[in-house]
Image (spheres, rainbow, N blue to C red):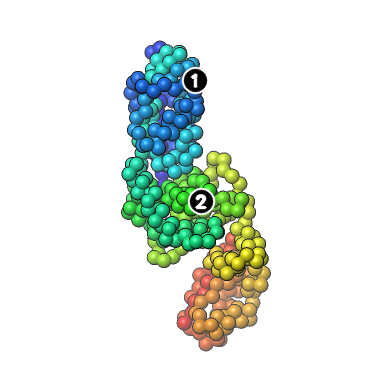
């Protein structure tokens, strides 16, 4: 998806026009804000930030005030104040579409005019808040810990949104009202649901390159704080495209920086995510805290069992043993980790016909962080 943030500053001091410094990484266009006198008086950076934050929270499209003090650095002060206000609220940061500011006056005082436009109206944001509360009331059960909350929120977003190929739906409101959104909408809704569930998280701005194309594109996802550790969470990329009803991906669920950097990149500074969630899962399962059944189920859902050495299949006899056990349970599919070449895998799969099964189909892929294959085989 393409980031769009528009900003400009028009400054008139003693008849001099000064162009704004444009931050990198965003597609900027020109927004004009005419100078005008304001009724409120601002004297410090703290007062400036407070006024801007209050105005943005009210969704005001225009903020006018008088700045009293040295104005030789006012352009930089306005720019910094706006950036700090937006960075303090990730949801609002990616909901504002454009901003511009202008001022005129002398070296000791200036009339300032700030103009803002939003992707979401105040009523739309109120709708998001109300819907999120209702959704959380439905999916968050009493006694759930943060591991459980993150999983149900992740799954809800993936199951209820579809990627917007028209690239028009950018907000959490768009996602909830239409069922479609680009990555910015996914990450905003995920941010809001996690935040309202009491889970600290951030929105990561960067790029991603699908492995099938290798073409990098602008992208956004979440960074989640769980039990004091940070993890990446990409609900957009965990949603199959085209959308598949009832299917939830796991490849971008609570990942480390190293794992994400295989196809994601970011240039801003974010907290380090360097803890493998499967290691966290192993520790949680070993605890006697009454949550083992959930953790064991989650381990299977995330396919972490494939990293247990006992799960490695490296011969036709081991594969037949596993398939026999599955058949005995009345199942017709098996997910396993295969240590060997593609040619050897083909031979071992052919050997399954000796068990009297028919129509064998399989899907193979590289198992992350190993030299082995992830294989999912089905039969009739």
Q: In this view, does 87 lie to the left or right of 307?
A: left
**Residue 148 position (above or below residue 333):** above
In the picture provided, is 204 more to the left or to the right than 9?
right
131 over 336 or under it: above or below:
above
Q: Which residue is depicted at the point 37% across and 36% down?
A: 58
- Residue depicted at x 54% and y 40%: 268
Name the side, left or right, on which 344 lies relative to 162. right
Q: Residue at x 49, y 33 (%)?
A: 84
Say what secondary structure mark 1 lies in.
loop
* Residue 308 image point, x, y percent: 65, 68
Callout 2: few (<14), some (14-19), or many (20+) C-alpha neighbours within 10 Å?
few
The one nearer the camera, 347 or 211, is: 211
Q: Marks 2 and 1, how far apart in space?
A: 39 Å
Q: Quadrant of residue 116?
A: top left
Which residue in the protein does label 1 denote? 73
Residue at (43, 57) in percent of width and height: 136
Instruction: In this rendered view, identify the residue nearer to me: 335 or 278.
Output: 278
Tag 2 residue: 198
Q: Position of residue 37 (x, y in %)?
A: 35, 20
Residue 323's spot in the image, x, y percent?
57, 80
């Amino acid at each position: 998806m393409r980031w769009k943030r528009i900003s400009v500053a028009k400054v008139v001091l003693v008849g001099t026009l000064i162009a704004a410094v444009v931050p990198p990484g965003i597609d900027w266009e020109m927004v004009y804000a005419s100078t005008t006198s304001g009724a409120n008086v601002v004297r410090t950076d703290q007062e400036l930030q407070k006024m801007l934050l209050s105005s943005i929270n009210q969704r005001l499209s225009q903020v006018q005030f008088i700045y009293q003090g040295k104005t030789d650095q006012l352009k930089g002060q306005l720019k910094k104040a706006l950036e700090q206000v937006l960075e303090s609220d990730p949801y609002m940061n990616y909901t504002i579409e454009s901003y511009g500011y202008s001022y005129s006056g002398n070296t000791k005082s200036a009339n300032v005019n700030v103009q803002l436009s939003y992707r979401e109206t105040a009523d739309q944001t109120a709708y998001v808040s109300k819907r999120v509360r209702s959704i959380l009331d439905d999916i968050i059960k009493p006694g759930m810990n943060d591991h459980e909350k993150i999983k149900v929120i992740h799954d809800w977003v993936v199951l209820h949104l579809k990627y917007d190929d028209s690239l028009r739906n950018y907000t959490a409101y768009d996602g909830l009202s239409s069922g479609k959104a680009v990555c910015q909408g996914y990450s905003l809704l995920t941010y809001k649901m996690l935040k309202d569930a009491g889970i600290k998280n951030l929105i990561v701005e960067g790029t991603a390159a699908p492995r099938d194309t290798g073409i990098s594109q602008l992208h956004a996802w979440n960074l989640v704080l769980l039990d004091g550790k940070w993890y990446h969470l990409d609900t957009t990329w965990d949603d199959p495209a085209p959308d598949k009803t009832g299917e939830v991906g796991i490849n971008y669920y609570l990942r480390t920086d190293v794992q994400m950097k295989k196809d994601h990149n970011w240039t801003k500074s974010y907290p380090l995510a360097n803890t493998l969630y499967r290691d966290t899962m192993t520790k949680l399962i070993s605890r006697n805290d009454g949550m083992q059944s959930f953790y064991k189920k989650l381990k299977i859902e995330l396919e972490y069992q494939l990293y247990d050495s006992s799960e490695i299949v490296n011969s036709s006899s081991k594969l037949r043993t596993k398939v026999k056990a599955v058949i005995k349970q009345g199942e017709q599919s098996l997910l396993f980790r295969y240590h060997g070449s593609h040619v050897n895998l083909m031979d071992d799969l052919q050997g399954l016909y000796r068990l009297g099964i028919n129509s064998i189909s399989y899907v193979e892929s590289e198992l992350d962080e190993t030299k082995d294959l992830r294989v999912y085989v089905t039969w009739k």
